[in-house]
């Protein structure tokens, strides 16, 4: 399509040094690069006068990420990227690729309707007990033996439900389910804002001690992420 166009990449591999990052930006700003292809970092704080077309490829990846903030973050990123298109006093064009053309977030991005997006997301979070209406504690369990970890995760989730009831979700595999030789499982605990966190911490540590006192679960590694970002 553009046989003589100069194309550059901007991602983790091509920006390992500050000098490499700055050179990519400088070349694009000066018109030495015609097409810049990159990851999300392309949208972060960059402003070019001469960009007329921006493409967002496979937006569904952002929408389908397993996190309660995924719709909010997808909207934010797509809006940021869209803002890169447009020369001075001229409108730009944004090409958005998605298999979910009827998705509410896609429509809000097209309409640039930030307030409607926020209102919808807050209503959902209140209904399903997520921040800012509830606090979250992610309970991560690790072990070298995947089958044993599955067994331990179910046992700990059962103990948590006996104390916290339906505030407990999981266990499930997090997006990164293995680091080197350690397998990982995740349990989510939702706690009302008015509930004392010191008491929740006390109960969590008590349940962890009960798990570790069981000979079968001595090798279990547990850590917590409170109010995860």
Image (spheres, rainbow, N blue to C red):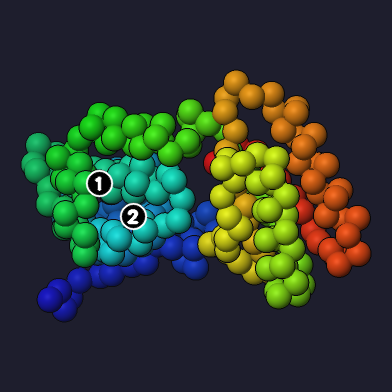
Q: Position of residue 134 (x, y in %)?
A: 53, 31
Question: Is the Cβ of the residue at disc 2 closer than 8 Å to that at disc 1?
Answer: yes
Q: Is residue 17 above or below residue 128?
A: below
Disc on res. 63: 2
Residue sticking out furthest to the left: 90
Query: For the residues marked 2 and 1, what is the alpha-carbon distance in whole angstroms?
Result: 8 Å
Can residue 179 be seen here? The reply is no
Front-most of residues 144 and 188: 188
Q: Position of residue 216 (x, y in %)?
A: 86, 67
Mark 2 vs mark 1: which is more N-terminal? 2
Q: Position of residue 94 (x, y in %)?
A: 16, 53
Residue pictured at 70% horizontal, 74% vertical:
146
Residue pictured at 25% horizontal, 46% vertical:
105
Q: Is residue 108 above or below residue 32?
A: above
Front-most of residues 17 and 31: 17
Location of mark 1 (residue) = 105
Disc on res. 34: none
Q: Position of residue 125 (x, y in %)?
A: 41, 36
- Give the quadrant of residue 194: top right
């Amino acid at each position: 399509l553009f046989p003589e166009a100069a194309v550059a990449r901007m991602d983790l591999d091509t920006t390992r040094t500050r000098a490499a990052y700055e050179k990519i930006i400088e070349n694009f700003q000066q018109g030495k690069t015609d097409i810049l292809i990159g990851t999300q970092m392309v949208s972060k704080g960059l402003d070019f006068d001469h960009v007329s077309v921006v493409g967002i490829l496979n937006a569904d990846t952002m929408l389908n990420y397993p996190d309660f903030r995924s719709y909010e973050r997808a909207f934010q990123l797509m809006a940021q990227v869209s803002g890169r298109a447009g020369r001075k006093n001229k409108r730009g064009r944004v090409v958005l690729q998605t298999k979910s053309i009827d998705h509410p977030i896609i429509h809000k991005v097209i309409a640039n309707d930030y307030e409607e997006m926020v209102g919808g997301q807050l209503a959902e979070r209140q209904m399903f007990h997520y921040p800012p209406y509830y606090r979250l504690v992610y309970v991560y369990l690790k072990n070298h033996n995947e089958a044993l970890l599955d067994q331990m995760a179910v046992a700990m989730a059962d103990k948590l439900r006996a104390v916290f009831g339906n505030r407990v979700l999981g266990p499930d595999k997090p997006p990164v389910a293995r680091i080197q030789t350690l397998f990982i499982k995740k349990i989510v605990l939702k706690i009302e804002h008015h509930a004392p966190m010191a008491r929740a911490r006390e109960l969590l540590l008590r349940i962890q001690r009960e798990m570790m006192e069981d000979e079968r679960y001595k090798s279990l590694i547990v850590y917590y992420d409170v109010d995860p970002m």
